[in-house]
Image: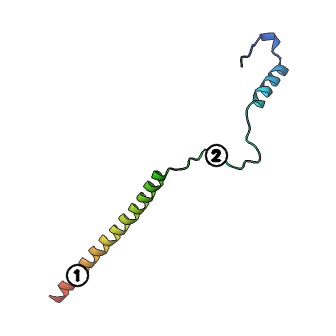
């Protein structure tokens, strides 16, 4: 919408009316809708994305278990070395 601004014809009352008119045309969220804008725009992940996320989660769990087992293995080797030294 174009606005014709003629110097002396634009009064403060006219400006107030114009701003109110423009703001009335802006849609406001309904009071019944309690979703935030982020929830409203949330995209449902595809099946492939869900499978990828599940794979990454399981992979991270397995990596953590491997690290624990490697640490346990190292501790067992140290214990074995200590036992050998005691036996000598």
Say how the picture is coloured. Answer: rainbow
**Quadrant placement of the C terminus:** bottom left
Identify which residue is drawn at 18% across, 84% down. Answer: 85
Q: Which residue is mark 2?
A: 40
Name the residue nearer the viewer: 7 or 37: 37
* Disc 1 residue crowd, few under 14, some 14–19, many 20+, Cα 10 Å: few
Alpha-carbon span between mark 2 and mark 1: 60 Å
- As drawn, the label of residue 80 is 1
Coordinates of residue 87 in the picture (x, y in percent): 17, 89
Name the residue nearer the viewer: 51 or 66: 51
Q: Above or below — where is 88 with respect to 72?
A: below
Identify which residue is drawn at 78% across, 31% down. Answer: 24
Q: Above or below — where is 4 with respect to 82?
A: above
The local secondary structure at tag 1 comes to helix
Identify which residue is drawn at 28% across, 74% down. Answer: 73
Coordinates of residue 83 in the picture (x, y in percent): 21, 85
């Amino acid at each position: 919408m174009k606005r014709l601004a003629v110097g002396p014809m634009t009064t403060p009352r006219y400006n107030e009316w114009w701003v109110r008119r423009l703001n009335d045309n802006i849609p406001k969220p309904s009071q019944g809708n309690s979703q935030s804008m982020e929830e409203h725009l949330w995209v449902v992940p595809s099946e492939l994305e869900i499978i990828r996320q599940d794979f990454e989660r399981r992979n991270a769990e397995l990596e953590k278990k491997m690290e624990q087992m490697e640490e346990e293995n190292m501790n067992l080797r140290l214990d074995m070395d200590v036992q050998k030294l005691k036996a000598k």
